[in-house]
Image (cartoon, rainbow, N blue to C red):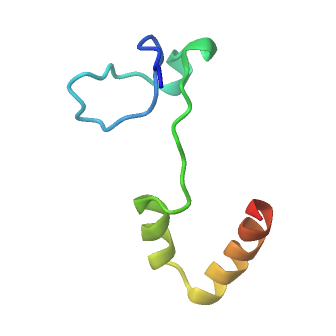
Amino acid sequence: QLIDVDLFTPCSPGDPEAEEMTWMDVPGDKLLEPKVSMVGPFFVAFLALQNPEKTQDFLEPACEAVG
């Protein structure tokens, strides 16, 4: 898979190869959308902090949308 090194994507604040900017600073044709996964660490951490009843209400429409 080839990656255009001329594109910008979100990264960790301490990334030594990063250039600090807001999303408004990035030209639209230079934005590389980050890969998003429902099984990623942030999503799992989010679920762990939720009320189980509310989490179920949140997940049902999301699961139906994914199939």
Using the image as rendered, state which of residue 10 and residue 35 is in the foreground: 35
Where does residue 11 sit, x and y in percent of width and height? 37, 35
- Quadrant housing residue 24: top right
Using the image as rendered, state which of residue 50 and residue 11 is in the foreground: 11
- Quadrant housing residue 65: bottom right
Q: In the orientation shown, which residue stands out farthest toward the front? A: 1
Q: Is residue 49 above or below residue 43?
A: below
Q: Say left or right for 29 vs 19.
A: right
Looking at the image, which residue is at 62% across and 16% down?
28
Using the image as rendered, state which of residue 23 and residue 42 is in the foreground: 42
Q: How many marks?
A: 0
Looking at the image, which residue is at 56% across and 32% down?
33
Q: In the orientation shown, which residue stands out farthest toward the bottom? A: 53
Q: Say left or right for 59 vs 19.
A: right
- Quadrant housing residue 19: top left
Q: Is residue 49 visible from the viewing direction of this image?
A: no
Looking at the image, which residue is at 46% across and 28% down?
9
Looking at the image, which residue is at 72% across and 80% down?
57
Q: Is residue 27 above or below residue 66?
A: above
Where does residue 37 sit, x and y in percent of width and height? 54, 54
Considering the image in quadrants, where does the C terminus appear? Answer: bottom right
Q: Is residue 25 above or below residue 38?
A: above
Q: Say left or right for 65 vs 45.
A: right
Q: Is residue 3 visible from the viewing direction of this image?
A: yes
